[in-house]
Amino acid sequence: MKKINTLPFKAIIAAIFLLLSTAACEDEFLDINDDPNASTDLTLSNTLGFAQVSLVSNLMEELNTNAGSFTRMWYTTDIRDYDQNQGTYSTVWTSVYAGPLADLQTIIDGAEEGESGYAGIARLLSAYTFSLLVDMFGDIPYFEALNAEIPFPGLDSGHEIYTDLITQIDQALGEIDASSGTIQGDLIYGGNLARWKKMGNTLKLKLYAQTRLDRGIDSESGFNSMINADIIASLQDDFQLQYGSRQTPFQNRHPLHVNHYNEATEYWMDNWTMANLLNNGMISATTGQPVSYRSVEDPRLPYYIFRQVPDDAGGAVATCQGGGCPIGLLGNGYLGRDAGDPSAFSNEGALIATFGVYPVGGLVDKGNAKTVDASDGTGKGIFPMLTTFMVKFLHAEMALTTSVDGDPLTLMKEGIQLSMDKVKAFGAAQDASVAGSVFEINQSDVDAYIANVEAAYNAAGDDAERLNIIMTEYQLALWGNGIEAYNNYRRTGYPDFAETAPVMGNPPFPLRFIIPVSELETNPKLANYTPNAFEAVFWDK
């Protein structure tokens, strides 16, 4: 594919411009009055805003959707047997390179003296994006990818890319330090460069954790140095994009709110996740034991999942109970699917459990089951990319599996508490009636939950069981971010959701996404490359 070093396609720019220019300030979206198509000489602030929205929107398409499906967060019939073909990622591959990555490179190249803060932010966003592309696809075009003089870039090894990304992050932090002007158009941190520095340091920390199995990178000393650096340490520092609440004339709500509240419900909640939240005793097909090691319900459940029916919808889903239909009613209206379930039933979109308030801006489940519509919730959701609870869970994993300092149990408990705090605060911000009510997450319930997890951790027979508990709790906290869940599972082998035996049987689990045929057929340097979904990425070997 020919990469460009200017602006993304006009259609992409126009769509993002309309999204941004019509958003209210209180929706935390940039208010832009200039038509970006009037000139190719866009301001750095406009370009930065376009790149941020375009980046997150692209991540939340097939990348997040499929990764979350692979790791039992939700379920989509398109990949019920882990199937990926060479056209699966054609759109997102083209869009990411020609859209946000090209825009970010434009900012890096175009920032003048005194504007190095823009370059630093763009470089950090580019490093984050390329790291995820390596995580998903393995070897990718990188060193030549955004060079307008090289129309056909070759593949670079993931190890070499990761090594350079750490250098790029350091350069970005230096650019931020050298900045002398204010930053406008920043939809993530509002131009707060101190928070961008925390994001950069946290990204480095994540890269070191991600590569702990790769002996070519000194991950342990790198992680130890970063854990004591200025990293994301509060909810206000979390690296995430906040969507707006506008529906007309141009939509700027969270994509999953649009898909599940405005239109037909697209995903089914996976029964493994709902069983763990409910602790309803789902049995492992391998061990014959309950999937969950807990005996209490997750306080985040009514914030994560909203029931559209109170029970079995007056018998509407009764045919799926014991009649050969694997669609699962876990009880009390929690209607989801087991992985690999290909079946369907009438009007299922109005019956199945769907996303709640966190993180899509939907409804808190207060026991008032209903078929959701566009008027429900605010749509002011988030896509959490790097958060304070992620730092704690990564530290817990490293402390358990390497010589990195720290107590894994204490760190995991801190991660759980931070996740609970985040979900609680988010729910109250979306629905003011929750605060102080019986539907607010209660600290005594959180304490009971954490004590229950701690008891299971202390009773674990070995580090493998302890790691499973850490990574299961991490995955539950990651609700909405399937990309990191997919990374975690491949890196650690946990949580052990595979024990629940998907309906589809036991097909090979994909270890990477497939570079699309659209790239292979148009780039002569990739003519002899054959994608292999079952070849591990470099940090998973």
Image (cartoon, rainbow, N blue to C red):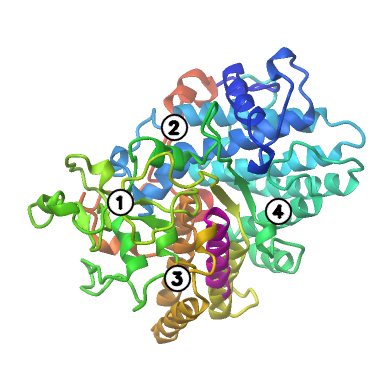
- Along the polypeptide, which appears first: circle 2 or circle 4? 2
Q: Which residue is mark 1?
A: 308
Contact check, label 1 and label 2, Cβ < 8 Å: no
- Residue drawn at point x = 53 percent, y = 21 percent: 523
| Image quadrant where one finds the N terminus | top right
> Is residue 149 shown in magenta?
no
From the top left corner, tell me how far across and down residue 107 is, in percent: 76, 31
Q: Which residue is mark 2?
A: 89
| 293 relative to 169 in the view: left or right | left
Q: Which residue is mark 3?
A: 438
Q: Secondary structure at mark 2?
A: loop
Amino acid type of disc 3?
Val
Nearer mark to the viewer, of 1 and 2: 1
- Residue drawn at point x = 35 percent, y = 32 percent: 85
From the top left corner, tell me how far across and down residue 104 is, in percent: 70, 33
**The magenta segment:** 414-431
- Give the farthest residue toward the left: 323
Amino acid type of disc 4?
Met
| 211 relative to 520 in the view: left or right | right
Labelled disc at residue 476: none
Real-space Cα distance between discs 1 and 2? 32 Å
Nearer mark to the viewer, of 2 and 3: 3
Real-space Cα distance between discs 4 and 1? 38 Å
- Along the polypeptide, which appears first: circle 2 or circle 3? 2
Real-space Cα distance between discs 2 and 4? 28 Å
| 456 relative to 503 in the view: left or right | right
